[in-house]
Image (tube, helix red, strand yellow):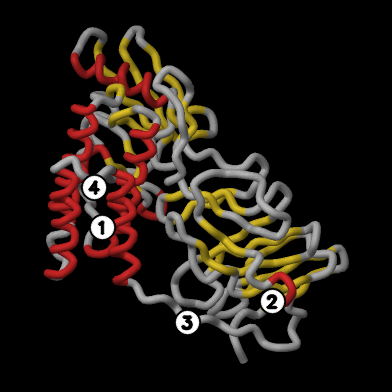
Amino acid sequence: MSGITVSRRGDRIVAVKESPSGSERAERLLTEADVLQRISHPNVAEYVEHQVDPVVQLVTMFAGTDTWERQPPEGLTAIRALAVVASVLADLHEAKISHGELVPAHIICGPDHRPILCGFGRSTALSPESKTADLNAIATLLDDLTEDLDDDQRTQIGAISTDLRCDSLSAREATGRLDALLSSEIPARPARQIPKGVLALAAATLGVIAIAAVSAIDNSPALQFVAVSTTAPVATTLETTTTLAPPAVGAPTLINQGRRYAIGQPGDVAVVGDWDCDGTDTPALLRPATGEIAVFSDWPAPAAGIAAQHIVVVDGARSLEIDDQDACIVLRVRTANGSVLIPLEST
């Protein structure tokens, strides 16, 4: 992050880039400012403000101290991170924007190692030429960051890289193939059982309450909990404000491994915790209107769905909390009369 100053603007920590007016770097900063003003995305540097006098200055929200140039992801973590970057690039392409210089120095290691794209100084409106350049950049990242994988994984990554360079694979399709590779390498966790007699199971709604990654946000059925990934296509143009995959208005929003999810409906309450002590945080969702609580064992992949692992009902439930009582996190439900714990491990 050379040439960047970290400072404070009010209660915000920001990153500041500046350059004398008239320089080539100044022109790139103005281009980047113009692009970032029109993008709202959890994996793109967030615009705060810019100025042109006495020097050109661009201010964005501070996202992290290191880039992939200094701290590159490795192994399966690299595949997962590259799937996120490919997904973000696909979102940009669907908004008719090319990045223009997608290199490790322009990918910040954000919170929870979430990749944050910056360096939009060479960004242009999408054209066949700029799209090809972006796809070649993703292919180069795939080649350079996955050298420590085994032969079979490298063969699969090499095929994706080749197809990107041949322009026979879009960024969205590359995301899907990387997600599929991850799914084949990471075994599913076994289902957990809730102790009988703790709370009444809402048997009638089992299979109806689900978390799913879908292609658009719509009015979900009353008992369907829906998560929308940032891989959702959004039609827009370079001339208008671009908000990529916006969450449902009023719905809880969560971020997991660089993808944003709008879960449930307005008025629902969502929390994230490691419910089974396996080292992975997953969502739990409360619908106060009905007292239904859905607990999920994983996050949905793009274009896939995951049924809730547990569904319980607590009369008068109005909020969820995580209760770190011992080695495992326990879900606590608050009601007007107190609270109740929901142990999620079998006895």
Hey, which residue is sitting farthest right in the picture?
Answer: 337
Answer above or below: position of 309 versus 96: below
- The residue under label 4 is 68
Q: Secondary structure at mark 3?
A: loop
Q: Position of residue 243 (x, y in %)?
A: 49, 32
In which quarter of the view is residue 184 placed? bottom left
Q: Secondary structure at mark 2?
A: strand
First in sequence: mark 4 vs mark 2? 4
Q: Secondary structure at mark 4?
A: loop
- The residue under label 3 is 190
Answer above or below: position of 263 versus 62: below
| Label 4 packing within 10 angstroms: few (<14), some (14-19), many (20+) | some
First in sequence: mark 4 vs mark 1? 4
Callout in the foreground (4, 3): 3
Answer above or below: position of 1 versus 16: below
First in sequence: mark 2 vs mark 3? 3
Amino acid type, mark 4:
Trp
Hey, which residue is sitting farthest front in the picture?
Answer: 168
Callout in the foreground (1, 3): 3
Residue at (58% x, 80% y) in the render: 326
Q: How far apart are labels 4 and 1 at the CA level? A: 10 Å
First in sequence: mark 1 vs mark 2? 1
Q: How far apart are labels 1 and 3 at the CA level? A: 25 Å
Q: Position of residue 262 (x, y in %)?
A: 57, 49
Q: As rendered, which of 257 and 307 lies closer to the eye?
A: 307
Residue at (32% x, 16% y) in the render: 30
Amino acid type, mark 1:
Ala
- The residue under label 2 is 342
Amino acid type, mark 3:
Pro
First in sequence: mark 4 vs mark 3? 4
- The residue under label 1 is 78
Q: How far apart are labels 4 and 3 at the CA level? A: 34 Å
